[in-house]
Image: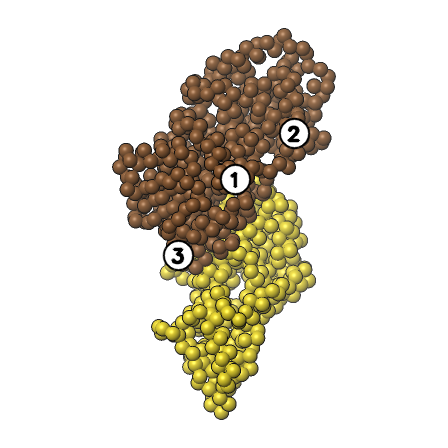
Chain colours: A yellow, B brown
Amino acid sequence: MASSNPVFGNDKPLASRIAQASTRPASRAYERYVLRRVVESMGSPRFTVALWDGFSITPAQGKALATATIHNQAALMQLVRYGEIGFGDAFSSGGITVEGDLVGFLVEAFRGVAEVRGPVKLVKRLQQRKPRANTPDGSREHIHHHYDIGNDFYRLWLDAEMQYTCAYFPRKEMSLEAAQQAKMGHICRKLQLRPGDRVAEAGCGWGGLARHMALHYGAKVSSWNVSAEQVRYASDRARTEGYADQVTYVLDDYRNISGEFDAFVSVGMLEHVGQENYPTLGEVVDRCLATDGRALVHAIGRNRPRLMNAWIEKRIFPGAYPPSLREMMDILEPYRFSVLDVENLRLHYARTLQEWLARYDGAYDEVLNQFDDEFGRAWRLYLAGSQAAFLIGALQLFQVLFTRERNNALSWSRQHLYTD
Amino acid sequence: MASSNPVFGNDKPLASRIAQASTRPASRAYERYVLRRVVESMGSPRFTVALWDGFSITPAQGKALATATIHNQAALMQLVRYGEIGFGDAFSSGGITVEGDLVGFLVEAFRGVAEVRGPVKLVKRLQQRKPRANTPDGSREHIHHHYDIGNDFYRLWLDAEMQYTCAYFPRKEMSLEAAQQAKMGHICRKLQLRPGDRVAEAGCGWGGLARHMALHYGAKVSSWNVSAEQVRYASDRARTEGYADQVTYVLDDYRNISGEFDAFVSVGMLEHVGQENYPTLGEVVDRCLATDGRALVHAIGRNRPRLMNAWIEKRIFPGAYPPSLREMMDILEPYRFSVLDVENLRLHYARTLQEWLARYDGAYDEVLNQFDDEFGRAWRLYLAGSQAAFLIGALQLFQVLFTRERNNALSWSRQHLYTD
């Protein structure tokens, strides 16, 4: 049970509910039947699933990576009726707990769901839905939902530069801190930043990349963001740390970017832009990029079009949609932008999430001082589930570098990205 | 006139036709009017256009890069009525000659046509046509048209490895020979080739890449090609040079590739595959790629969908179509292939073509021993025009590396491509 995990030690309500399990009625035949069909439809997952009365289904062969326990009938019905949303909600409420390797369990579960066979197609049906539209007002609300949870919360498990996007680990064993610095350097090199370059940034998070560009490359950066908390944090740091003349954080929508810039960059915003707005994003870049300008979009993507995991879209990231590379071309093709370089950092994101989850677990007491158990478990599932999704290739991380069609002032090769 | 160019010294029929120009009737008012409208519609191109009687239109400002002379009314009408096809045919027949910087002239002309204004939209109308379909029989015929012209012809201006695709110049000043070796090495590194790896190659040209993979990487390569001349050449070399046990050249369509392979590679074939066959190509890769296999497609592309230059498609490369990156995804998305790396080598192709054209011009006497003037001029235009197209970004060169969605045995970064 989760309560046996030290980081979940103060998870009182759940622990007591679980303790009551023995006083609950034994599972019925149809409940065991339904459970068996769910597990069978996933092939031969390498985990054990148990019901509240001790009934369990174990892997046909090999050791189980984890044991998922469904603690009551309501949680079982949530899972069966609502698929991934039901699982997520039941996990968050404590109706389902996972003991053992949570990421490994989710890898097995996602793989199983992707190849779901037989009559249990409920999960698939849930994918018919559409993500919520990202109108300017809607975007602000969606972003508020996620990013204005509180800087204190993110500080518990992000690096010192508050980078809430995929890090880049040129050496596997490097620290998250170093890998986030390396990510920012990698992007600046791809953009061939030079002192004095004017940079427009769409979606700046807590301002780390703009900071890096100003301090390490002497660039003049204007960064747009609709999260008031993030803009306040970034602006405060710029003032306190003395580079406010080089960086301007603007509390506004990316659609209102104006001016001319030598580089355009957007890291981890596209997921929130919404497909219907891709041509608009392209128009923004076209409007503001100098003749010889360079542009980079860094975003979570897919190998083929598919909606975001339903539970994450509903509970964690409203309006989120990771595009396929083909779909990303809706930004570029109308303006004849020329793709110079696409790099897929999928495994780097899995590694980043592994670091975040470890820090999150390490700070779990503090999380529960700020939020309730349900929030704590939901975010744990989100971090573990995202790691699993990158590990199995359900999610990709694309960095796309592009310029105007007629820009011949390109770097001759990519060698410069790999020499100190 | 072209006859003033030493490489065109033996261009007798043209020279005598040009000599007769003074005996032709003076250009009429409507002919001069039409010419003026054509030039005006292209903005302010930096070249001079002259008619047979000496009437000319010079750039409004600056020095002309070149002078195009239209030697008779028929050539003028060809140009006006048939746009790029008319120009190409008139150039090939000698009805239009270009003195000065041919590539610079074509850069200006392509730019002008791309932004064509006013009533002269004939060129645009020509782009409504569809490329010819590539059925297996059709493909064989199209390939025969181009690649079976004769190995002796290509030997005149290609490198020793007979690489008829974009070279890779890690250092700008390196020789074509070295750059073609570097291209093959770059591809092998992207594919992470190891000794003993089984490689399937779709479209092998004269077999150079297969040779390189066998000799430098110890791979076992099977290469498919529908050009009998190329397969004969490649097989002969393999026998003579003693690596026939490592390389098999198969005279057959890529659609018939069978077996299981650790790597799939296709360099410069996609242009001839035809859009309607992209899903079939994806199916071929899916059928033959091992679980942890790597695949690379190297092809000429576009920033957005547009047909091949009409004249090249008609006279040089029947059935050719350079896809946009979005269109290339028709190969990958249905099979959930994961794009790891896209590199655009557009300027490397311009450089390659510059080398080819210089060698071609140097061997022009020999070209005319093998073929007639018209062929000689047509190929000169094709090489110069292609260089111009890459220089202005009308064509791109995409190398796309991909694997199966769940392959986690990836290279951790691209560092290995840039270290010796």
Q: How far is the residue under mark 2 from the one under mark 1?
A: 34 Å
Question: In percent of the image, x 47 and y 14: which residue is there?
Answer: B10
Q: Which chain is disc 3 placed on?
A: B
User: Residue at the spot x=37%, y=60% of the render?
Assistant: A173
Q: Which amino acid, by three-letter code, is at mark 2?
A: Met
Q: Residue furthest left?
A: B242
Q: Nearer the viewer, mark 2 or mark 1?
A: 1
**Circle 1 marks a residue in which chain?**
B
Tell me where residue B268 appears, x and y as whole percent: 46, 39
The answer to whether mark 3 and mark 1 are in CB contact below 8 A is no
- Give the residue number, with chain letter if any, for mark 3: B291
Residue type marked 1: Asn
**Residue at the disc numbered 2:** B42
Q: Which one is earlier in the sequence, the residue at label 3 or at label 2?
A: 2
Work out whether residue A413 can be spotted. Answer: no
The amino acid sitting under disc 3 is Thr
In the rendered structure, the answer to whether residue A266 lies left or right of residue B32 reads left
**A387 relative to A265 in the view: left or right:** left
Q: Which residue is mark 1?
A: B134
**SS at badge 3:** strand
Quarter of the picture containing the N terminus of chain A is bottom left
Q: Can see residue A164?
A: yes
